Amino acid sequence: MSLRTPVKDARGLGSAKDGVHHWWVQRLSAVALIPLVLWFAFSLAVNAGGDYEAARAWIGSPFTAGVAILLIAAAFYHAQLGLQVVLEDYVDNKALEIAGLVVVKLLAAVLALTGILAVLSIAFGG
């Protein structure tokens, strides 16, 4: 029989203040993705019959390139936040959890940067 209270077991495990910020940022990125994905789906439907040059001209316009960059950044950031929650909640091995978090963050950054550079390359005629 233990005389320790649940509060004694919970002390020293860190602050619970960071979770609210993470929750809000994930919800805000989800809300931002709604119009971006709708715009992208509508744009693809409108440009479905076009050829390669029409697609390059479409993505090369400043507005389209800017919105596409916002879509890429928001999508990878939102995905990284979601995978972070999954790793923190379901991976019991601390070393494996930290390694997974590092891999997810690096992979999201590299893929987002690759997508953004591809859009910029097309937009600037590269």
Image: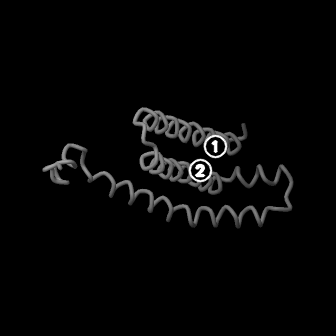
> x%, y% of residue 110?
57, 36
Q: Which residue occupies the extreme front position in the image?
A: 1
Name above or below for residue 118 compared with residue 81. Answer: above
Q: From the viewer's perspective, tell me whether residue 48 is left or right of residue 31.
A: right
Q: Tag 2, which secondary structure?
A: helix
Q: From the viewer's perspective, tell me whether residue 68 is left or right of residue 103.
A: right
Residue wearing tag 1: 115
- The front one of 8 and 41 is 8
- The front one of 4 and 14 is 4
Q: Specify few, some or many for label 2: CA neighbours under 10 Å numbering under 14, 14-19, or 20 or more.
A: many
Residue wearing tag 2: 72
Alpha-carbon span between mark 2 and mark 1? 7 Å
Question: Which amino acid is tagged 1?
Answer: Gly
Q: Residue 71, labelled with which disc? A: none
Q: From the viewer's perspective, tell me whether residue 50 is left or right of residue 66.
A: right
Mark 1 and mark 2 in contact (Cβ < 8 Å)?
Answer: yes
Name above or below for residue 125 compared with residue 24. Answer: above
Q: Tag 1, which secondary structure?
A: helix
Tell me how many marks there are: 2
> x%, y% of residue 55?
78, 53
Q: Residue at x 20, y 54 (%)?
A: 6
Q: Specify few, some or many for label 1: CA neighbours under 10 Å numbering under 14, 14-19, or 20 or more.
A: some
- The front one of 25 and 36 is 25
Q: Residue at x 44, y 51 (%)?
A: 85
Question: Which amino acid is tagged 2?
Answer: Ile
> x%, y% of residue 24?
38, 60
> x%, y% of residue 64?
65, 56
Sequence-earlier tag: 2 or 1: 2
The quarter of the image holding the C terminus is top right
What coloring was used for the rendering? one colour
Q: Residue at x 24, y 48 (%)?
A: 15
Q: Which residue occupies the extreme left position in the image?
A: 3
